[in-house]
Amino acid sequence: MEQRPKQREAAAESALHGDVLDAIVSRVSPLDLLPASRVSKAWRAAVLSSPRRPPPWFILHHLGRRQVAAAFDPLSRAWRSLPCAPSFPSHRQGPQPPQVSSYMLSPGGGTRLCVLSFSALALATDPFGASWRELEPPRYSRTDPVVAVVGTRVVVAGGASDLEDGENAVEVFDGGASGAWVSCEPMPEAFRWSESISSAAVGRRLYVLEKQSPFTLSWFDVESRRWGPARGVRVPDPTVRHVAIGFANGRPLLAGAGGIGTGFGWRAESVRLWAVDEESLQVEEEVGSMPRAMVEELVGDGGWGLSSLGFLSEGRFAYVYNPSYPKDFFLCELEEGGGCRWESIPRPACMEERPTHRVVVCCCQVGVEDLMMGNDRTV
């Protein structure tokens, strides 16, 4: 006898429930959980309330005339093209076009899109840029500043014009209190002439690192609105030319690209990861090293093509990439017993090997509720 809908739903709930259902949910891609959430009320509740922490997705936004967006799902091992370009908020026309970049999120981790213009600062509230939160613009006009959301506060640091005498200016927007931008203690003087900065947010702190020698590292406390000590990081490998910082397994993680030669003759040959002490800002033990074959893929151009190191992390996963040569991307999983497991990820078919326009990358958790906002398809 054919079962009625309610009988089929009851049968599904009795077959899989509780810890068994949670265990299944924790190992399945959210793309596959989307249809499963429609099986029954119990399954939908399990899918949406699961405490699972799957690997973060790696999301690319190519901002040319023909905007392209693609996302890599580590569980399904596939790139997914987003159905359309992010729905960037419409900003009033100003002297310069809006700047599209990414911001860090704490707690929760990961990075998402943001757009800064003379009329507003817009922050994506989902991984794909389908919805936005708009704020008044910071008081200082800025170019490529560090942007982070720490709790209820939005932090914008650096990037201000030297004509405004505020290159290192820091402003905080407290959505739960003043509802306005407040000027804070500026970034340490050591960052005044920094050409490139890596940053990461965790807890109540924003960490910033100079990506080239002398590798100055410091942190900003959003509660006290003050900076901690600024110290040059002593990288164990003296051949390291480029560094970046992230957070993995609850502690700062330093990524460094080492090589041979000097000056313009320097050539990258290694990428290594080290743990960093949160208070002393000193490098501790090495936690992983990228296989040599992958380093060669990362660098390209016979070893001469690495002018900066891209590094994004969340949970126990990290992505390493070459910002100027995005031919391949690399996923690193920090294993519980120590060490790392590396995986090479070819670029999506929709992405050029040498993009002529800006590419913004993000790394964040993606849940079923995020996928419910729109359709996606495999690239």
Image: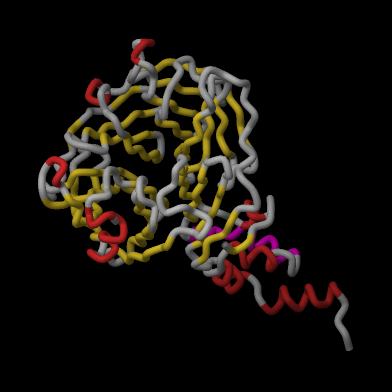
Examine the rendering and report whether any part of residue 349 can be seen: yes
- The image position of residue 76, as x and y in percent, is 53, 68
- Magenta region, main secondary structure: helix
Q: Using the rendered view, name the quadrant where residue 252 is placed.
A: top left
- Please state the extent of the stretch shown in magenta in the rendering: 41-54
Q: Is residue 179 visible?
A: no
Q: Which residue appears at 60% of the width and 21% of the height?
A: 93
Q: Residue at x 61, y 36 (%)?
A: 88
- In the drawing, does residue 12 fall left or right of residue 212? right
Q: Position of residue 215 (x, y in %)?
A: 21, 36
What residue sits 53% from the left and 56% below the top?
350
> Quick one: 348 or 342, which is closer to the camera?
348
- In the displayed structure, does residue 42 sit left or right of residue 81? right
**Percent position (x, y) of residue 15?**
69, 79
Q: 143 or 191: which is nearer to us?
A: 143
- Identify whether 214 is placed above or below 188: below
For the N terminus, the quadrant is: bottom right
Q: Position of residue 371 (x, y in %)?
A: 64, 55
Asked if residue 358 lies in the magenta stretch, the reply is no
In this rendering, position of residue 210 left or right of residue 377: left
